[in-house]
Image: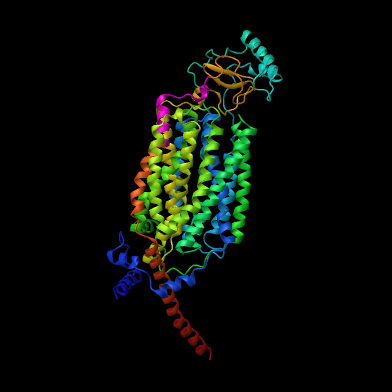
Amino acid sequence: ARRARARKVLSLVVRHSLPIRPSISRMEAVMMQSPASPASQNLVANTEKRLACGTIAAYSAPRMPFSAIDLLIRPARITVYRDALGMTIAAQAMIVSLCKSADFLLGFMLGKLSDATRTRWGRRKPFIALCSPVFMICTLLLGSPGWFFSRPHSADGNSTVTTVSEACAALVDSSNRSSCVELKACIDAAVASSTLRPWNATDGNADGVAAAAPASLSAYFGVLYFLWYLSGWTSSLIPYDALGMELTSDYHERARLFGVKTAFQFMGYLLQIGVGLGVSLAFETDVLMQVRLQAVAYSALLGLCFALLLRSVAERPLRPPKHAPLPMVPAVRQLLANGPYRQYLVFKVPMTIASLLPANLIIDYIKYSMRIEDFNATYYVAFAIVLLCVFGAIPLLISAARRWGKKEVLATTCVVEALLFAVAFAIPPGAMADGPLYILCACVGFGMAASYVLPDALLADIIDYDELHTGLRSEGLYTVVESNLQQYAEIVGGVVPSLVAYFAGFQSLGGCSCGCGAKCDADYLRWSCPADVGYACTDGFGATLLYGEPDRAAPCTVQPEGVQWSFRVFFLAVPAACYLLAAIPAWKLPISSHSHRAIVAQLRAREAAEAAAARPAACSEAAEAVAGGA
């Protein structure tokens, strides 16, 4: 009887569209935590069918090239635009922050427009069909700046390098990195004639800083980066994510759907790692070519996957809305009045920052804190370990979430991740090579899987709770907030560390004009720096140096101590603190599996009651029409 009274009160709240209360009331909590009636359970079971495997695969497939593109462009901002082409770290940080800030309001407008759209193809698929081709073109151009730009430098600071390069080019044997007697004699002669400067002589660049990139490079990057985010992560991915939340309302079926989607997401990461490692071996010192080839391949793959989704996945029919759509500001206020959603944001914000910081800074940590010249090889191996562990963790997380609950598993994982990052921060970067770094990556993989699999499923449950109160499905608006959270976490995870490093004295490539992945103009140079020219048998990593200490660290990996500490703190210490901050609100999230079953039962019961009430009205209208015709 008490449960019946509670349901009656709750139905009155929904019927009269009272404002959402800031949190679940005591009466609602009693109702939600009690088992639903057998009739309601049967109604839910009969209404929701298990999603077909083909539908799940077709929906999840685009996440694979999306992830590969993300993992390609994110480090390309560092390796291509900043290091290979010379864009300053401060200029890039400001461009990224401006692009994301401008995209913030556009994202809200897009989500609202998607929720209100009604076409015969659905309300999500038209946005995907129109915007994904623009995203593919932007990916291709953003990954291919080498078609239009090159780093403004000469190989060794001397204008006659072209003549010397031509004279000695025939003596470079790319298959022999350890012995090159004739090439050394050629370089000796050029140095003796003052055509080339000695390996340890300071060049004519008085301040020791390589020439700055042209302003046109910053404009090119800024325009394309904004369009790339707007057409892809906003106009394509927001409707795509909202579509997934609408495919099913079953608690466990959503965990299965988002688990498969996450598997495809990390398959894309693994694809990029495998392909990236292959092209890095084929074009070892030419990062521009590495990124360009991958941009072409992933853009084509994304087009195929989206074509499969548009052809194979049907949107669920929507019930006519009971109320006119709210304007933007009231809609956002109503969304933020959802108590469970506010608590969701409290753990989602620090967790998003914690997951983005390591991905954004791992290259800088390996290259400038650990001081590894061939950073790409270490980066790809480390990320491959992370992704393999993610694949192993996904089925374990889904099983654990079914047994103990999604929020409990998520909170426990946050605590474990916080401890792991804190321990890693205490280890000096030089001691992290090989073993400790790869052990950390193996443990981090489990945490990354949890941060991708479980929050999306929890958000879908919260949207059901919102529908119970408002009578409206607002997946698009909720997904907009999720997307903008990702973008502003990207500002914290990418822009803030870059600005801190800039004020600490960061110089691209340590002030060198080439080396460490930025290809030099001459094949006998491993690097060219203000006080050190790396003359070698070839330009490949590990090629024998012809002068100086043969085992000396590459000067293109040298940064001031403050810069090294900034990368270390943001890579390890800040994620540890963020994971710890996320654990408590994740554990206290009010919607559990039992309460969600009660929410869905109430929604289905209301649908059945509305359908039953609509049938007599329809019959009456038909009778009147027949009578009028007679």
Residue lying farthest to the bottom in this orientation: 630
User: Which residue is more in the foreground, 226 or 405?
Assistant: 405
Q: Quadrant of residue 203?
A: top right
- Residue 256 % position (x, y): 50, 58
Quarter of the picture containing the N terminus is bottom left
Q: Is residue 433 above or below residue 182?
A: below
Where is residue 331 drawn, in percent x and y? 38, 58
- Note whether residue 134 is visible: yes
The spot of residue 444 in percent (x, y) is 46, 42
**x 51%, y 34%: residue:** 78
Residue 550 within the magenta-colored segment of the rendering:
no
Q: Is residue 220 visible?
A: no
Q: Residue furthest right?
A: 170
- Outermost residue on the top side: it is 192
Main SS, magenta region, reads helix
Query: Which quadrant of the view contains residue 179?
Result: top right
User: Is the image coloured rainbow, by chain, by secondary structure, or in one colour?
Assistant: rainbow
Count every numbered label the image shows and give the total.
Answer: 0
Q: Which residues are magenta?
A: 552-571
Residue at 53% x, 45% y is 388
Whether 556 is among the magenta residues is yes
From the viewer's perspective, is 29 left or right of 252?
Answer: left
Q: Where residue 239 sits: x, y (%)?
A: 50, 56
Q: Is residue 257 left or right of residue 538?
A: left
Q: On screen, 601 above or below 140?
A: below
